[in-house]
Image: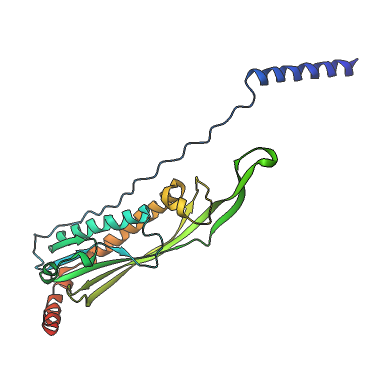
Amino acid sequence: MKTLTRNLLSSLALVGYATLFFASGGPKQVAPPPTPAIKAPNYDFEPPQKAPAKSAQVVFLLVDPAYQEKFAYSNYKIFSDFSKAMSADYNESLTAKGYSVRGPFEYYDQVVYNDKKESDLLLQVEIDFDINGSNVNWTSYQEYVSGKGRYATYRTAYRYTGFFILSGKVNLVAAEPLTREKLWAKSIPLKQKQVYIAPNFNTLERSYNVGFSRDPGVINPMIEALEDYYKQVFNTSWNHLDPNELAPLKKEVLEIREKKKY
């Protein structure tokens, strides 16, 4: 009798669960969480002090900072934003030091002869970054494309997680504007960073194209690392761009031009 009662109760419970299941329309589809927004980088340097205008009595020719050719990611917005912001802040820093500035020009080849001739020094800024992806872990899987059953088609896609190792330095070079002969150089080393990523998108190839171009899970942590680098670069550059060290180079510029018959 107890067994019969137990079976009857179990059957009623199953009927109740089924009624609730179908009444609710079956299992609810849980929407994926929204993709986070891409962070707006805060690349800005405020000179700690300002010298009187033209007090350094040196005219600088300024060309936009550029990445070394070996750096494969310089055209991605995440990195081009970094170098473009540097251009404006080097202009502001030189002016705050009391220098006069011609530029900034996008490339040296855009500078006309008179701007070169009437400048005392050329400031070139070289960004030497390295991104090591040896700690990024890749997983392949078959992604559904279309069709059903045995007619379904799939393609190989990839997920990746882990971290990049970001390192590098920024080189400052002061040169004679016409010949580009180097007269002064400083290197600003940047401490190695582990940049942990949490990609939101998968990719159809083993590359970081999607990540560096539009994935907040890759871009945002990289921006945070670059913001820290930016502060380091300009705090150090401010000390290096001392008129007491750079103004005497005008004498060497005159000697080079006399020798080259400019």
Residue furthest to the bottom in view is 259
Residue 228 vertical position relative to residue 10 in the rendered view, above or below: below
* Residue shown at the point (38%, 55%) measured from the top left: 76
Image spot of residue 106 (x, y percent):
24, 61
Image spot of residue 67 (x, y percent):
33, 64
Number of dots carrying numbers = 0
Q: Is residue 244 left or right of residue 223?
A: left
How is this picture coloured?
rainbow
Residue 97 in view = no
Residue furthest to the front in view is 151
Towards the viewer: 176 or 151: 151
Residue furthest to the right in view is 1
* Residue shown at the point (62%, 49%) measured from the top left: 141
Residue 151 in view = yes
Q: In this view, does 142 lie to the left or right of 176?
A: right
* Residue shown at the point (18%, 75%) measured from the top left: 176
* Residue shown at the point (62%, 46%) measured from the top left: 154
Looking at the rendered image, the quarter that the N terminus falls into is: top right
Residue 203 vertical position relative to residue 102 in the rendered view, above or below: above
Towards the viewer: 170 or 25: 25
Towards the viewer: 139 or 204: 204
Residue 233 vertical position relative to residue 42 in the rendered view, above or below: below
Image spot of residue 111 (x, y percent):
18, 66
Image spot of residue 128 (x, y percent):
36, 66
The quarter holding residue 190 reads bottom left
Looking at the rendered image, the quarter that the C terminus falls into is: bottom left
